[in-house]
Amino acid sequence: IEIRNDELDDLVIARPDARQVWVNFAFPDNGLVQVIDAETRQVATTLAPGRAVLHMEFTPRGEAVWVSARDDDRVIVYDTATFAPLATLEVGTAIMAAPASYELDGEQYVAVIAGLGGMVASSYPRESAAHTYQNYGRVLAWKLGGGPTPLPRLREKAVTPEPPSLATDSDSA
């Protein structure tokens, strides 16, 4: 299969059994994911997981894919056979790296690095978690069927103190 990739920021990832190719796109289409059937070379489906899909990771056998939607501060897990969402994980922090999938004692887990920093945080939508929650870096790990993700504390509104008086001793004379 040949996929023309004229955009440097597009991501193409093959399911581990090579039956599908998953493609997400650069801005302004970075909220879409297309799944291509490798045998027919046709688009099997188009998904809209959320704003700024930047990372995808398959489970080792490829039965599920974990998709991060950075600007919606969530991870969506899809069944790769039916394309149905298996879970939506609210993160409260933007995902900043590709997920890593691993197995421990027979349980399937996925871990990500999350959190924004520096000047880049000011460019995110006002409704994103970077403006709602305290934004510190953290590592998150999940298993399907696990509990909700602990969210960071809400940001406190910054209060600007009243400026000091500019009166001097000579003003009172």
Image (cartoon, grey):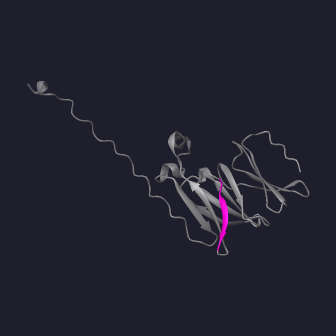
Considering every residue shown, the one lying at the far front of the view is 105
Q: Main secondary structure of the magenta part?
A: strand
Q: Residue at x 50, y 61 (%)?
A: 151
Q: Quadrant of residue 5?
A: top right
Residue 102 among magenta residues: yes
Q: Is residue 96 left or right of residue 15?
A: left
Q: Residue at x 56, y 54 (%)?
A: 114
Considering every residue shown, the one lying at the far left of the view is 173
Q: Position of residue 131 (x, y in %)?
A: 49, 48
Q: Is residue 119 left or right of residue 57?
A: left
Q: Residue at x 34, y 45 (%)?
A: 159
How many numbered discs?
A: 0
Residue 103 among magenta residues: yes
Q: Which residues are magenta?
A: 98-104
Q: Nearer the viewer, residue 99 or 91?
A: 99
Considering every residue shown, the one lying at the far bottom of the view is 106
Q: Quadrant of the C terminus?
A: top left
Q: Position of residue 60 (x, y in %)?
A: 74, 65
Q: Position of residue 139 (x, y in %)?
A: 55, 58
Considering every residue shown, the one lying at the far right of the view is 40
Q: Quadrant of residue 142?
A: bottom right
Q: Position of residue 40 (x, y in %)?
A: 91, 57
Q: Residue at x 51, y 45 (%)?
A: 117
Q: Is residue 148 left or right of residue 52?
A: left
